[in-house]
Image: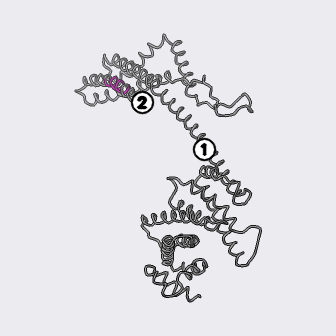
């Protein structure tokens, strides 16, 4: 049995004992009041006054028993926290103890009561007799009223004293101990949470610092240890991971745009945008490796997609790995849309970039069967992309895709291969050939 069950069992026994003693007294009062049955009004008056006498005597007894039963706080144990470094503090370490005013009052009152009782011991019988005479007038003022009143006062005072003392000793000490234990545990939990926050803050700061070094170029690519970076990023909080993703995303996006502008303007510089994009690859890869069961689908999709973009656009592209990452992003996106109530229009950016990767690895080194398979994959992704009207301009502006389409579909006879790709065929006729 648990401590709580034991306490409940003891309380049940104590309550039964207390009710039994009071019931005996009430039965005695009821029997005493029956002698006035011929006078109902007087019988009710006697019973009411007797009830108040019982309750008064019981309350006084319980109160005095409570005073005598209040437990004392033990301050012998060392209260200084073990986990606080006091080497630089004075010897007078401030210890905060529970308020013991009630114990001191109890101690004073019990001493006063005992002292008064001892000094007035010879007068106590007379005072009790006077009290019994006073209350007996309200209990019918019969020859037996005085004796019965004395019995009521004595019985219920002793019952109240014993009940108050036992109840205080049995349950108050346990309640106070429970509160102290709860307070101590709460303090430990607060310190534990505080330490966790501090530790997490240190991990987040370390992750942000390392990522900033990589993206800014303070740490060379050859100096980056991917496994170590994975551990640092994985230990960061989800909020910090989103922050890292945003920094790497902006670096990749701005570098891609800068490289495009420099290419169009035929400018040269110390470092091109593709090299800067290369720095984002280990960061995105660390984010992908940090994915766990608690990571939301939207976040997982972003991580895989950004890694796929960076692998495609870096200084030395890895198109095959980029395709794998984009396939992961597509799979997550399609799963979300399958279970979503609101079916939104898909913007096929993943398929557009995947087409570029597939075209980039399409070369004469492949067998005819492999080339056929690659061509069908490219056409499927372009067909899906062209289902969105906004993608036409992007495809038309991409020289790699346009050159591939032009080289593979030069005339009307070659369009026979596009019987399953009507949107690609329409795009070639209406957009690409007109442009040429």
Say above or below: 396 vs 314.
Answer: below
Nearer the observer, 91 or 306: 306
Q: Quadrant of residue 366?
A: bottom right
Viewer-nearest residue: 80 or 265: 265
| SS at circle 1 | helix
Q: Nearer the viewer, mark 2 or mark 1?
A: 1
Could you classify mark 2 by the number of other residues whose Cα lies within 10 Å: few (under 14), some (14-19), or many (20 or more)? Answer: few
Q: What is the x, y in percent for residue 51?
A: 35, 28
Image position of 78 (left or right of 298): right
Residue drawn at x 66%, y 52% is: 225
- Marks 2/1 in contact by CB < 8 Å: the verdict is no
| Residue that lies at the very extreme toward the bottom in this rendered image | 434
Closest to the observer, 80 or 37: 80
Q: Nearer the viewer, residue 230 or 432?
A: 432
The range drawn in magenta is 14-23
Magenta stretch: residue 210 in it?
no
The residue singled out by tag 2 in the image is: 2
Q: For residue 336, say whether it is visible.
A: yes
Question: Which residue shows up at 36% across the image and 22% down it?
Answer: 137
Q: Earlier in the sequence, mark 2 or mark 1?
A: 2
Q: Quadrant of the N terminus?
A: top left
Residue 334 placed where, x, y %? 46, 66
* Residue at image point 52% right, 24% down: 71
Q: Is residue 346 visible?
A: no
Instruction: Locate residue 140, reporting x and y percent.
Output: 31, 23
Could you tell me which residue is drawn at 48 percent across and 71 percent down? 369
Q: Which mark is residue 331?
A: none
Dominant SS in magenta: helix
Q: Residues within 10 Å of mark 1 (few under 14, many from 20)?
A: few
State the residue position of label 1.
196
User: Quadrant of the image for the C terminus?
Assistant: bottom right
């Amino acid at each position: 049995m648990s401590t709580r069950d034991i306490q409940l069992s003891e309380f049940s026994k104590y309550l039964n004992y207390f009710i039994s003693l009071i019931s005996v007294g009430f039965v005695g009062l009821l029997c005493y009041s029956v002698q006035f049955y011929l006078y109902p009004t007087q019988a009710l008056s006697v019973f009411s006054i007797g009830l108040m006498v019982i309750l008064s005597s019981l309350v006084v007894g319980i109160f005095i028993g409570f005073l005598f039963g209040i437990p004392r706080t033990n301050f012998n144990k060392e209260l200084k926290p073990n986990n606080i470094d006091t080497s630089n503090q004075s010897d007078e370490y401030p210890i905060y103890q529970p308020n013991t005013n009630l114990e001191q009052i109890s101690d004073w009152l019990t001493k006063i009561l005992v002292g008064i009782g001892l000094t007035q011991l010879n007068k106590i019988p007379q005072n009790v007799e006077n009290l019994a005479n006073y209350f007996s007038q309200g209990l019918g003022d019969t020859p037996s009223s005085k004796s019965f009143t004395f019995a009521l006062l004595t019985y219920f005072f002793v019952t109240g004293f014993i009940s108050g003392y036992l109840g205080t000793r049995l349950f108050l000490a346990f309640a106070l101990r429970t509160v102290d234990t709860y307070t101590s545990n709460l303090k430990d939990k607060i310190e534990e949470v505080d330490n966790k926050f501090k530790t997490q803050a240190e991990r987040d700061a370390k992750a942000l610092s390392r990522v900033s070094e990589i993206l800014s170029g303070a740490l060379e690519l050859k100096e980056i240890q991917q496994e170590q970076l994975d551990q640092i990023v994985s230990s960061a909080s989800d909020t910090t991971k989103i922050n890292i993703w945003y920094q790497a995303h902006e670096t990749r996006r701005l570098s891609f745009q800068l490289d495009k502008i420099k290419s169009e303007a035929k400018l040269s510089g110390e470092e091109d945008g593709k090299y800067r994009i290369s720095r984002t690859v280990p960061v995105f890869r660390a984010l992908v490796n940090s994915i766990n069961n608690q990571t939301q689908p939207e976040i997982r999709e972003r991580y895989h997609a950004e890694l796929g973009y960076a692998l495609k656009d870096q200084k030395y592209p890895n198109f095959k790995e980029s395709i794998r990452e984009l396939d992961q992003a597509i799979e997550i996106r399609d799963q979300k849309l399958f279970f979503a109530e609101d079916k939104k229009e898909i913007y096929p950016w993943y398929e557009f970039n995947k087409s570029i990767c597939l075209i980039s690895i399409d070369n004469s080194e492949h067998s005819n069967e492999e080339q056929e398979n690659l061509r069908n994959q490219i056409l499927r992704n372009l067909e899906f992309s062209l289902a969105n009207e906004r993608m036409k301009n992007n495809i038309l502006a991409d020289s790699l895709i346009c050159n591939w389409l032009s080289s593979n579909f030069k005339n009307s006879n070659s369009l026979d291969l596009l019987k399953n790709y009507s949107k690609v065929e329409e795009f070639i006729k209406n957009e690409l050939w007109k442009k040429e």
